[in-house]
Image: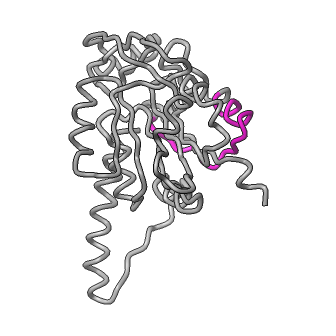
Amino acid sequence: MRVSEERWALRVGFKSVLRNLVRKGGYDVHHYPTSCGVLHQEHLFTQLSRLKVNCVIDVGAHFGEFGNYLRVLGYRGRIVSFEPVSKSFSVLAQRATADRDWHTYNRALGANPGRLRIRIAKSSDMSSFLTPTEYCNSDFASEITLEEEDMVEVGTIDACYEDCISGIENPHVFLKTDTQGYDINVLRGAKSCMSKLVGIQAEVSVRPLYEGGTPYLTAIQFMADMGFDLTGLFVVNRDRHLRVIEFDCVVVNRTLCSD
C-alpha cells in the first residue's frame, strides 16, 4: 500500500491547507460520500483514536511511507519501524531523523530469529523472502525483476516488544505489517504478546503473488483465531479487470469489544 499511502498523505495535507483557507472565509469543506464507504485513512484515524494507540510497530517499513502517513493523519505517539533492506533502510532512517519519537531498525521480523536470504526487487517495495508466482512475474514483470539478493537479520516481535514500549506508561500497541507475503510469519513471532496488541493492519493477498504466501481468507481466520475481529478491508490494488489483488486488513482485539 506504500504508493497509496504517499498519495493520501499528500492529499490529506493539501486538503488541510485548503480547509484552513476556506474557513477563513467563513465556510467549511466536507467529504462527498462515496460508494466505497469509509475511506481507509478515516477508518485508521478513528481506530487509532478510539483504541488510544500510543505505539505503532511498523514492520516492512520500506522508505517510511506508513510512518509519514500516520503523522499526516495526526498521530503523535511512538512509531517503531523495521526494514531489512539496507538501501531502503537508509531512506527510512533519514526520513525519521527529525522525529524524536520515530525509532528505526535495520531488521526483518518473522516467526523465528535468525538470518534469511531476501530477494531485492527492482521496485524495492516488492522485495520478499518468498519467490514470486508465475502470476506475479507476468503481471508485475517490470517491478519484480530481481536486482540482487542479501542475507538479512530476522528477529521476532516477542523478542523486541519490551524495547518497543520502553518508557511508555500504559502502552496501547497497534501492529502494521506489510512484508510481501510474509505477514503471517510476522504474526507467528508475536504469539506471546499478541493479546497485548489493541489492533493490527496486515496486507493480505487475494491473487497469489508469492509462493507460500497465505491466502487472504486463511490470514483473516488466523487473526480471528488469535482473538481479533475484522473491522475493515481496503483495496490496495486491482488488475486490469478490476479484480482485487491485495487488501489492507484491519482487525481489533476482541476483548476490547466485549462491551
Residue 46 picture location, percent across and down: 54, 61
Q: Nearer the viewer, residue 39 or 212?
A: 212
Snapshot quadrant of residue 251: top right
Compared across the picture, whether 100 is left or right of 182 comes to left
Question: In the image, is residue 116 above or below residue 197?
Answer: above
**What residue do we see at 64% from left, 49% from top?**
231
**What residue do we see at 74% from left, 50% from top?**
255
The residue furthest front is: 167
Residue 10 picture location, percent across and down: 28, 55
Say whether residue 211 is visible. Answer: yes
Residue 15 picture location, percent across and down: 31, 66
Q: Which residues are magenta?
A: 219-237
**What residue do we see at 26% from left, 10% from top?**
148
Say whether residue 247 is visible. Answer: no
Instruction: Tell me the quarter of the image containing the C terminus.
Output: bottom right
Question: In the image, is residue 137 above or below residue 200?
Answer: above
Instruction: Tell me the quarter of the image containing the N terminus.
Output: top left
Q: Nearer the viewer, residue 46 or 103?
A: 103
